[in-house]
């Protein structure tokens, strides 16, 4: 089996706060892993470590065969890892001064030296794919939240990532826009994209996840197929959490 993301006994601290504790996690090619847990349990920190947005203190972290060393170690694979990992945030994080189209073209041209014609064609194809071809020349502030998040997904896809990380991609959206973003994510999953998704959308998790991971205070305390975790949680922390959110 091909592991796209692999974490072994990974530990992360913020000062004295032990945020991630002995995380063991291997994500296979094409797998969709949904990470759930209470606020402050370490979900964002976990996925931010995967693309090197946060450093970690000890253990092993590898993305598509590129090892990213703990703090103080050899970071030379960081640029390569960033190219292969797409990230979508709660707050879209689009470039406000660039048109939708240019938001999508920028990274391929800067980081991968794609020529303008190719980057433009890729952007057109991706805008079509996320259903907003008609918004190409607008600025982010002229779009709805749901449209902005779809641009953010298209922008990440333009780098042809091996894995996509989503950190609560629908949490900042008005309820009526959640569905359009989840639809795009569902399509991506169907097409075989490897995905790690932090979300509170339990319906999405149940339907799309191959595996659900429950984190409590920086530890993976339960994982399994969605049916098993949701319908028959074994750990009492998971039971308590699910009884609050379901
Ligand atoms: P979650 O995404 O599950 O809500 P986070 O990963 O954001 O949790 O945070 C986990 C813990 O780490 C929390 O206690 C949070 O306050 C703390 N934390 C997160 N980011 C930082 C930071 N940059 N500096 C210090 N503490 C942080
Ligand atoms: Mg978070």
Image (spheres, rainbow, N blue to C red):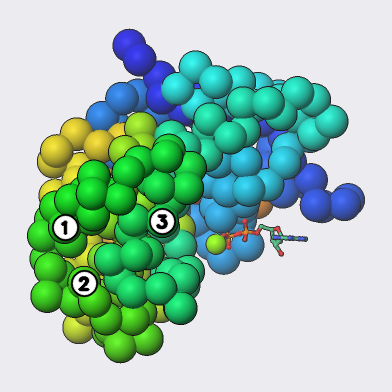
Neighbours of disc 2 within 10 Å: few (<14), some (14-19), many (20+):
some
Secondary element under disc 1, as helix, strand or loop, is helix
Residue to which mark 1 is pinned: 124
- Provide residue 91's location: percent of width, then percent of height: 46, 72
Secondary element under disc 3, as helix, strand or loop, is helix
The numbered mark at residue 170 is none
Where in the image, quadrant-wise, is ligand 1 located?
bottom right
- From the viewer's perspective, is residue 118 above or below residue 26? below
For marks 1 and 2, give the CA distance.
Answer: 8 Å
Ligand 2 within 8 Å, label 3 CB: no
- Provide residue 147's location: percent of width, then percent of height: 24, 75
Q: Earlier in the sequence, mark 3 or mark 2?
A: 3
- Provide residue 83's location: percent of width, then percent of height: 47, 37
Of the 4 image quadrants, the one containing the C terminus is: bottom left
For marks 3 and 2, give the CA distance.
Answer: 14 Å
Can residue 111 be seen in this snapshot?
yes
Q: Residue at the spot x=32%, y=43% of the render? A: 115
Neighbours of disc 1 within 10 Å: few (<14), some (14-19), many (20+):
some
Residue to which mark 2 is pinned: 136
Residue to which mark 3 is pinned: 106
- From the viewer's perspective, is residue 147 above or below residue 123? below
Kindly indicate the quadrant of the structure image that contains residue 219. Answer: top right
Camera-side residue of 168 and 107: 107
Q: Are marks 1 and 2 in contact (CB under 8 Å)?
A: yes
- Provide residue 221's location: percent of width, then percent of height: 54, 40
Camera-side residue of 125 and 61: 125
């Amino acid at each position: 089996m091909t592991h796209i993301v692999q974490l072994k006994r990974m530990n992360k601290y913020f000062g004295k706060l032990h945020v991630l504790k002995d995380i063991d996690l291997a994500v296979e090619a094409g797998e969709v892993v949904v990470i759930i847990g209470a606020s402050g349990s370490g979900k964002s920190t976990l996925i931010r470590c995967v693309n090197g947005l946060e450093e970690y203190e000890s253990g092993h972290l590898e993305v598509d065969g590129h090892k990213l060393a703990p703090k103080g170690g050899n970071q030379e694979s960081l640029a390569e890892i960033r190219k292969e990992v797409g990230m979508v945030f709660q707050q879209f994080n689009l470039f406000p001064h660039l048109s939708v189209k240019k938001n999508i073209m920028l990274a391929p041209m800067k980081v991968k030296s794609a020529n303008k014609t190719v980057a433009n064609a890729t952007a057109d194809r991706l805008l079509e794919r996320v259903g907003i071809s008609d918004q190409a020349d607008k600025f982010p502030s002229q779009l709805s939240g749901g449209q902005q998040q779809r641009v953010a997904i298209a922008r990440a896809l333009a780098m042809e990532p091996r894995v996509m990380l989503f950190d609560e991609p629908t949490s900042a959206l008005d309820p009526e826009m959640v569905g359009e973003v989840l639809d795009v994510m569902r399509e991506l999953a169907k097409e075989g994209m490897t995905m790690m998704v932090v979300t509170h959308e339990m319906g999405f998790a149940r339907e799309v996840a191959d595996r659900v991971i429950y984190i409590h205070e920086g530890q993976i305390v339960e994982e399994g197929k969605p049916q098993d975790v949701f319908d028959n949680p074994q750990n009492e922390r998971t039971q308590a959490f699910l009884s609050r959110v379901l």
